[in-house]
Each structure stands twice: as C-alpha cells, then as structure tokens.
Amino acid sequence: MEKLNLESTKSTPKVIGDNIQGTLIITGNCFPENSLSFFNDINSWIDLLPKDLKFFNLECELNYIASSSIIHILKIMQKIETLFPIENISIKWKYEIDDEDIQKLGEEFDKLTKSSMELISVEV
C-alpha cells in the first residue's frame, strides 16, 4: 500500500499518506466513534513504510480532537520515532491562532517526543 487516503467525515479527519515521499497529513476533526478501529488503518500503513526512507514528515492540523484520539496521535509520533532516525523526522503541528487547547496539546506532544516539532499558528 503506497498511498493512504481516508476521506474526512463529520467525526474523522482527512488522512493522506505517501510512502514514496514519506509524508502523513492529518487534517480536520478527530472524534471517531471507534478510535481504535479508525487508527488501525493508519498504523497498518505506517507498518508498511519502507525502512530506507531518507526523511519522514508528519503534519497535523486538527480543529478538534477527542481525548480518546489523543493517545493514538501520540503513539503514531512515537512509532515513527522508532522507525526512523530522529534527525530525519519533521513534525508540524498546526493550530488555529486562537485555539489554545490545540496549541497546548501540540506543546505537550513536543515535550513527549524526541523529534523536531514545529508549532505553527494559522489564521482562520
């Protein structure tokens, strides 16, 4: 599976993964009814990433995230860190300029991960 393409719904984010480019982009709302099932597809895709990727980029821009999904996002970040050298991982955490909750969540993820994380405020 080279590409991962999960369309957004009212309760799930759009997820685009490209294992050739080494990118995973997650955008939208994230409060799936069954978070374990939703994140299973993403984790399965990560498991199939080529081990010889030179660089991996993770980009998250979430408008809302349920507490049940927070641990899954953190596990994705940590899983990527086990697969690739820390210096070859880039994480971008985007949040709306006035959304302190998502901003603080990004700051917490930054503390809990070893790779470089860029916190980016975006205008609405």
Image (cartoon, rainbow, N blue to C red):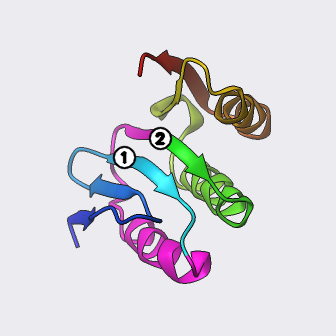
Q: Is residue 74 magenta?
A: no
| SS type, badge 2 | strand
Q: Residue at position x 49%, y 76% from top?
A: 38
Mark 2 surroundings within 10 Å by alpha-carbon count, few (fewer than 14), some (14 through 19), many (20 or more): many
Question: Along the horizontal axis of the image, is 105 left or right of 85?
Answer: right
Q: Is residue 115 above or below residue 78?
A: above
x and y, in percent, of residue 35 in the image: 59, 75
Which amino acid type is shown beneath numbered disc 1? Ile
Q: Quadrant of the C terminus?
A: top left
Mark 1 surroundings within 10 Å by alpha-carbon count, few (fewer than 14), some (14 through 19), many (20 or more): some
Q: Residue at position x 61%, y 20% from top?
A: 98
Q: Residue at position x 59%, y 26% from top?
A: 116
Q: Which residue is mark 2?
A: 60
Q: Residue at position x 62%, y 33% from top?
A: 115
Between discs 1 and 2, the one toward the N terminus:
1
Q: Is residue 21 above or below residue 4?
A: above
Q: Which residue is mark 1?
A: 25
x and y, in percent, of residue 39 in the image: 51, 72
Mark 1–mark 2 contact, CB under 8 Å?
A: yes
Residue stretch rendered in magenta on the structure: 33-60
Which amino acid type is shown beneath numbered disc 2? Cys
Identify the image quadrant of residue 54: top left
Residue in the foreground of this view, choosing between 123 and 23: 123
